[in-house]
Amino acid sequence: MPYTLSPLAKELKHLEQQGDYLAVIALVKSQLEANKRTFADPYIKEWIGRRWRNLFLQEAIHDKRALKVASKKLAMAKDKRSAPQKIAERFLKGDHHVEWAVDMPAAQISQDLATTLIFCPGFINGLLPAHAFAEEFPAIEAEYGWKIFQADAHPMRGCEANHSDILQAIIDGKGFLSNPGAASDQFRPSVPPEDVFLMGYSKGAPDILSTLVHHHQAIGQRVRCVVTWAGAIGGSYMADNFYELIKNADTDLLTSRLHDFLQLLVPSLTRKGSLRRLAEYDIKGGVHSLTTSARNEFYKNYHGLLDDLNIPVLNFTAATTALEVPTFQMADCLNLTRYDGNNDMQVTQEQAKLKIPMAAHVAMLHGHHWDVSYPPFPKALRMTSPNLDHPFPRKAAIVAIFKLLAELGLID
């Protein structure tokens, strides 16, 4: 639906049409510094999307693997498209993939950034054969010196139960090094961070939003902004189905047969071994917290409060097709297609967005729910199913997020 441009939006639009992107960048930053509520202006949110996508292309063209995947195999001729066009057409969805032709400047920032990224992982984190951003976070820390660590979010209990884990990360600095690897029970030194921004993947997104609602007086001034990455903000229809299967089951039996339950969720991919914090597992509570009814109830009760916190929220969604997901996820992807053809095999576009004025949908990525977050799964598993190689340029995406937030003045 068309909207009336504010005076600020009219000025920004004029500058953009003139190609004066440096002026746009400076004006947006100054307005956000003067009043963070400026983030709610629809044109500002559109600019933020265009700017991140441009910064993403600037970074991703240096990812040799991503470029190789994005190049078309032609029988008689070379793929003559430019590197930005290849990346955009392969890894972005929707009308935005044509933005590769827009020539914007590099990020207008200092490389020295002090704000800490606290990453909140998703459901059954640590139980899959790979960890989200396990390769990308350490590489970014090593190259740029930016501070990143992962909250010790429990892999299988409700959003409210995980408040304590996120609070300990924000207030005390308790969490894992950005690459937990095999030593996932080894914590980083608990040094309390100063200002932070939070990034929630999958269930990590509603975990964060729930924590902010119930503990904003304790942490609200320290949280500069929130990034949701394929977040299950509106729940998942898959969780609805699983909850119907287990809601009447014996809770103790479910916990004692935990590995069997995980195999039901993710056939052949969850790993056996020592399970941390076993006494805290709440399978029913964890699955229920991801149902559409639970998340819709949360939104109904708290969306006004979330908006009033004036904390900018940047939503990143993903989209795929049934032929681009692991074999055992095809049925789920097809089922979600009944609701939204642009689902990521776990959540739909609407479920991955927070619909408040202080939230912006930044990009729809072309990849499935794991592709955009996990490094390639072990080779032995990739031999049993296609689409576990996960070529999405994740490092470029995270670097672009840091640079965008710094350019906007949302992090220091």
Image (tube, rainbow, N blue to C red):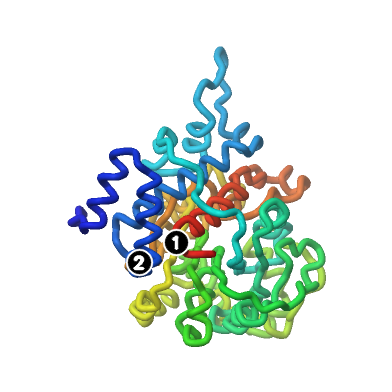
User: Above or below — where is 150 with respect to 382?
Assistant: below
Residue 24 spot, x, y in % from top left: 35, 49
**In the rendered structure, which amino acid carries the disc numbered 1?**
Leu
Q: Nearer the viewer, residue 221 or 86?
A: 221
For marks 1 and 2, give the one nearer the viewer: 1
For the point 61% across and 58% down, which residue is it? Answer: 112
Residue 365 spot, x, y in % from top left: 49, 48
Task: Tell me which numbered mark, 1 or 2, is placed earlier along the sequence.
Answer: 1
SS class, disc 1? strand
Can residue 288 be seen here? no
Residue 106 spot, x, y in % from top left: 50, 43
| On-image quarter of the C terminus | bottom right
| On-image quarter of the N terminus | bottom left
**In the rendered structure, which amino acid carries the disc numbered 2?**
Lys
Mark count = 2
User: Above or below — where is 113 with respect to 72?
Assistant: below
Residue that mark 2 sits on: 355
For the point 47% across and 72% down, which residue is it? Answer: 291
Mark 1: few/some/many CA within 10 Å (<14, 14-19, 20+) = many
For the point 43% across and 40% down, which residue is it? Answer: 104
Q: Which mark is residue 314?
A: 1
